[in-house]
């Protein structure tokens, strides 16, 4: 075998392996680094979800250990060329707040026209300190901030679509225009805004990976286990920060 047709033969073997799904990680994550680790490429986007004071212990809707992810999120973000942030951004008296519904308490539910709504303590009200990003979050290279939940009569967990599954934040168009193919998710909370965003990423035809140790969940009424089951079914990959090269 000559050198050049050996090269052709090898590239044929590699293409065959990829087609057979043997290189699943490389194909799905967009790039393969050393020792099976993932190196995000230029078409990969890190989405940092709702690392805001109200979701941190001491805030209005604290997520257990929410503060502990901040140094890890900073470190992960440094390994991505492209990063965006999301920010829960509610109007005062928002429909998702228990205080808006007479006789209702936080974590109870109500039936709304778009489905069952969990009711929350007032949180992430536009312009308040609780809606600001955690003071130690350092993402100078973030390219966009997507705000969501600003429609008075509809909640929005997902970074793509509001709770009716139709009203858009504009993220789908942005991702399309920028040519991103693979979205990585970190932040708060695993079972709500992270999970719903990852599911919607799959719905619009993107690869989606959730970096589990850089997320924390609220876990109300079994919501964390339910979210992971739904994500697994939808083809969202569950990875750890140690799976990344950087
Ligand atoms: C979130 C509940 C209400 C979240 C936002 O960021 O996961 N959860 N609003
Ligand atoms: Zn909210």
Image (spheres, helix red, strand yellow):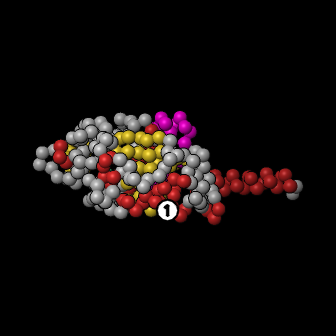
Secondary structure at numbered mark 1: loop
- Determine the residue positioned at 70% across, 55% down: 14
Q: Quadrant of the N terminus?
A: bottom right
Is residue 176 a member of the stretch shown in magenta? yes
**Residue 106 in the figure: left or right of residue 76:** left
Residue 142 versus residue 245: which sits nearer the camera?
Answer: 142
Out of 169 and 15, give the one closest to the viewer: 169
Viewer-proximal residue among 6 and 83: 83
Above/below status of 195 relative to 153:
below
Residue underneath mark 1: 240
Drawn side of residue 26 relative to residue 124, left or right: right
What percent of the width, then of the height, locates residue 148?
35, 41
Instruction: Locate residue 147, reporting x and y percent.
Output: 38, 40
What residue is shown at x 51% (from left), y 53% (from top)? Answer: 77
| Nearer the observer, 188 or 238 | 188
Q: Please tell me whether residue 134 belongs to the stretch shown in magenta.
A: no
> Which class describes the residues within 10 Å of circle 1: few (<14), some (14-19), or many (20+)?
some
Residue at the (60%, 49%) spot, across then down: 41
In the picture as drawn, the residue positioned furthest to the right comes out as: 2
The answer to whether residue 223 is visible is no
Tell me which residue sits at (30%, 41%) in the image.
126
Q: Locate residue 218, reporting x and y percent.
A: 31, 58
Residue furthest left as drawn = 103
Where are the magenta residues, as a range? 172-186
């Amino acid at each position: 075998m000559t050198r050049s047709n050996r090269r052709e033969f090898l590239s044929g073997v590699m293409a065959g392996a990829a087609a057979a799904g043997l290189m699943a990680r490389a194909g799905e994550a967009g790039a393969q680094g050393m020792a099976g680790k993932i190196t995000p490429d230029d078409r990969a986007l890190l989405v940092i979800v709702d690392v805001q004071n109200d979701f941190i212990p001491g805030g209005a809707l604290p997520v257990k250990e929410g503060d502990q992810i901040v140094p890890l999120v900073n470190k992960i973000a440094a390994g991505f060329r492209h990063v965006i942030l999301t920010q829960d951004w509610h109007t005062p008296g928002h429909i998702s707040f228990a205080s808006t519904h007479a006789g209702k308490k936080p974590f109870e539910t109500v039936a709304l026209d778009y489905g069952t709504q969990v009711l929350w303590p007032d949180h992430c009200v536009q312009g308040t300190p609780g809606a600001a990003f955690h003071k130690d979050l350092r993402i100078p290279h973030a390219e966009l901030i997507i705000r969501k939940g600003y429609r008075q009569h509809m909640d929005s967990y997902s970074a793509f679509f509001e709770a009716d599954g139709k009203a858009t934040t504009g993220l789908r168009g942005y991702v399309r225009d920028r040519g991103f193919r693979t979205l990585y998710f970190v932040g708060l909370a695993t079972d709500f805004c992270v999970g719903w965003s990852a599911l919607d990423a799959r719905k619009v035809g993107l690869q989606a990976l959730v970096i589990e140790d850089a997320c924390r969940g609220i876990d109300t009424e079994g919501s964390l286990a339910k979210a992971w089951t739904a994500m697994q079914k939808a083809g969202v990959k569950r990875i750890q920060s140690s799976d990344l090269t950087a």
